[in-house]
Image (cartoon, helix red, strand yellow):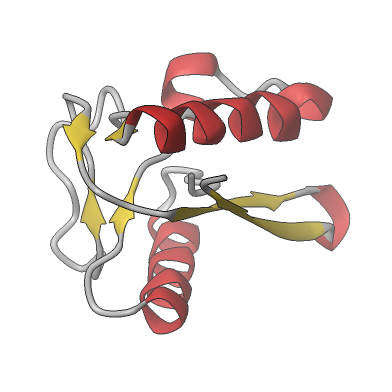
Amino acid sequence: NAHGTSTLSNDLIEATMLRRVLGESPLVTSTKAMTGHTLGAAGGIETALTVLALQHQLVPPTVNLDAPDPRIPIDVVAKEARGASFDCAVKTSLGFGGHNAALVLTRA
């Protein structure tokens, strides 16, 4: 569950980092498009959505993403949820003032 600011500079840097760390073709979504930026609640809400994705083996879509930029080097799940088999998921948060975190969640 990427931070996904929808700015080319940030999205390109985040996508490049995710691909470098997670490998050739990680499935990536950003749920902020569904929830809006909930500021202090964003981490908890996005973590809950990531846990649900793991439980149901379903990657939620990045809604309102009509034309992914071809310069973004990852597989962004757009428009519709996608079924997939995965045992772990990463949720990233980038905060004001350089407060950054990544949470790795695994299936029990």
Q: Quadrant of residue 62?
A: top left
Name the side, left or right, on which 44 lies relative to 76.
right
Q: Is residue 18 above or below residue 76?
A: below
Horizontal relation, residue 50 to residue 54: left or right: right
Residue plotted at (87% across, 56% down): 97
Residue occupying the point 72% across, 35% down: 43
Please identify the quarter of the rendering in which residue 44 is found. Answer: top right
Q: Residue furthest bottom?
A: 20
> At x 82% / y 48%, what residue is drawn?
96
Q: Based on the displayed image, in which of its 4 quarters is residue 25 positioned?
A: bottom left
Point out the residue furthest to the top here: 35
Residue nearer the viewer, 86 or 102:
86
Q: Position of residue 50 (x, y in %)?
A: 52, 35
x, y percentage for residue 4? 47, 45
Horizontal and vertical percent for residue 108? 57, 45
Q: Is residue 64 above or below residue 98?
A: above
Coordinates of residue 10 in the picture (x, y in percent): 50, 60
Q: Would you say 26 lies left or right of 47 here?
A: left
Q: Is residue 81 above or below residue 97?
A: above
Number of numbered labels in the structure image: 0
Residue located at (17% from left, 24% from top): 80
